[in-house]
Image (tube, rainbow, N blue to C red):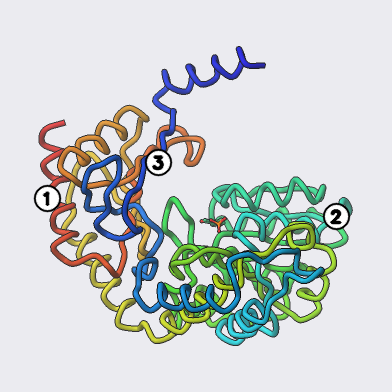
């Protein structure tokens, strides 16, 4: 086995696909210290700049003093602290759904929820560009698994008409993590009503950013239905860690019994929940942050003008610049690093072969000057590389 592992790693390296971790020595912010170098960073999903906010640091310190640092046991034994419970109620109210349930990560939420709700008599319909953990949840459930081309409502409808499954679940990222575009959720919900299906949306990149007061993609489209189950992560715009699932009370009650990644796992420390309660308040009060973020998005889109590389059409904080081959995108990312700017090179299998890209991720913590610096460096790179 070890020989195989060596060979696989060598093959990855030869193809420009080897991934390496950077060593971070600063808080997550727009200016970071990584591998002992200072960078202007366009890498994080901390879209509102909350990961290093003094109010949240203070909230975590205070809550740790009151509740300790560990949860000690799973939720169904003694691990369900009042801080977890308060956060669940606050989140449900915020996203305007009847109930919510916390998970320790978005990955755990997706595999747990889909695995619990669907079984071998059911069918899952998934966008081809969905996040890996939605697919993994589908495999775990043993339900029939149908993938449709990205955002293709007609292809999805065709699959639904052909399905004889007992229960049907349409699963999609609301905002696609590597493309930044938004799924046609109103059309999906209409199909759910027509074909008696349910809609599972992963709002990892919409929560905190889109909709009224950052309530997310459901609010963005003003969607309401008992057929909707949403998941959002709390380690991206919310700036901390974790995830929650929200929907009808009966769905949440069922998940508490049946979602294995909930039942058999130790919850995140209660202090994290207390911190998140403060973070959700900052999100709700953060219209100025979202306005500033939108301004930066508009600035990038209106000033970046390269002929060789193309920004994908996105109105969200995720602005992908498609470069093409693995070595090309690495070379560009390295050129920017030489200029003190960090933008991650995203390669297959995260994105389809030949569509290697710089995933520029903007944050309310950036200034207009930061964006101008990035744009100037990209124009320079186009002329030189
Ligand atoms: C990041 C992400 C997840 C996983 O969430 P974590 O809390 O980081 O485990 C799930 N879905 C999407 C679309 C994501 O971008």
Q: Earlier in the sequence, mark 1 or mark 2?
A: 2
Instruction: Judge the density around disc 1: few (<14), some (14-19), many (≥20) Cα neighbours within 10 Å.
Output: few
Locate the C terminus by quadrant. top left
| Residue at the (31%, 47%) spot, across then down | 321
Residue 153 lies left or right of residue 310; in this view the side is right
> What SS does tag 1 mark?
helix
Q: Residue at x 41, y 77 (%)?
A: 58
x, y percent for residue 20: 41, 34
Name the quarter showing ligand 1. Answer: bottom right
Q: Is the C-beta of the residue carrying label 1 under 8 Å from the nearest atom of ligand 1? A: no
Disc 1 to disc 2, how far (Cα)? 52 Å
Q: Residue at x 24, y 67 (%)?
A: 296
| Label 3: how many Cα within 10 Å (few below 14, some 14–19, many 20+) | many
Is 253 displayed left or right of 267 in the figure? right
Asked if the residues shown at circle 3 and circle 2 are in contact, with their CB atoms under 8 angstroms apart, the answer is no
Q: Earlier in the sequence, mark 3 or mark 2?
A: 2
Residue highlighted by disc 3: 346
Which residue in the structure is indicated by mark 1? Answer: 376
Where is mark 2, residue-wise?
A: 119
| Nearer-the-camera pick, 162 or 239 | 239
Which secondary structure lies at badge 3? strand
């Amino acid at each position: 086995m070890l020989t195989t592992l060596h060979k696989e790693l060598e093959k990855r390296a030869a193809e420009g696909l080897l991934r390496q971790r950077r060593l971070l020595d600063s808080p997550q912010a727009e200016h970071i210290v990584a591998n002992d170098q200072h960078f202007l960073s366009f890498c994080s999903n901390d879209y509102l700049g909350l990961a290093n906010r003094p109010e949240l640091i203070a909230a975590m310190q205070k809550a740790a003093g009151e509740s300790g640092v560990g949860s000690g046991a799973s939720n169904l034994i003694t691990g369900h602290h009042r801080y977890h419970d308060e956060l669940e109620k606050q989140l449900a109210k915020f996203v305007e759904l009847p109930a919510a349930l916390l998970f320790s990560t978005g990955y755990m939420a997706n595999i747990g929820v889909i695995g619990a709700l669907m079984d071998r008599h059911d069918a899952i319909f998934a966008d081809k560009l969905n996040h890996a953990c939605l697919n993994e949840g589908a495999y775990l459930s043993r339900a029939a698994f149908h993938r449709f081309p990205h955002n293709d409502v007609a292809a999805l409808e065709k699959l639904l008409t052909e399905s004889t499954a007992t229960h049907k679940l349409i699963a999609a990222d609301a905002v696609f993590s590597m493309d930044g575009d938004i799924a046609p959720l109103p059309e999906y919900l209409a199909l759910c009503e027509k074909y008696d299906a349910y809609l599972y949306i992963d709002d990892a990149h919409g929560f905190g950013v889109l909709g009224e007061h950052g309530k997310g993609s459901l609010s963005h489209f003003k969607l309401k239905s008992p057929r909707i189950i949403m998941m959002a992560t709390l380690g991206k715009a919310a700036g901390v860690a974790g995830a929650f699932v929200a929907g009808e009370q009966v769905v949440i009650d069922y998940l508490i019994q049946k979602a294995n990644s909930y039942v058999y796992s130790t919850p995140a420390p209660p202090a994290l929940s207390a911190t998140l309660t403060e973070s959700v308040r900052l999100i709700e009060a953060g219209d100025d942050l979202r306005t500033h973020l939108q301004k930066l998005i508009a600035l990038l889109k209106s000033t970046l003008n390269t002929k060789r590389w193309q920004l994908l059409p996105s109105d969200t904080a995720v602005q992908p610049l498609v470069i093409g081959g693995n070595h090309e995108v690495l070379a560009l990312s390295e050129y920017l690093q030489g200029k003190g700017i960090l933008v991650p090179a995203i390669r297959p299998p995260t994105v389809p072969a030949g569509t290697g890209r710089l995933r520029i991720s903007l944050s309310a913590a950036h200034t207009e000057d930061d964006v101008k610096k990035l744009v100037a460096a990209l124009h320079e790179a186009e002329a030189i590389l």
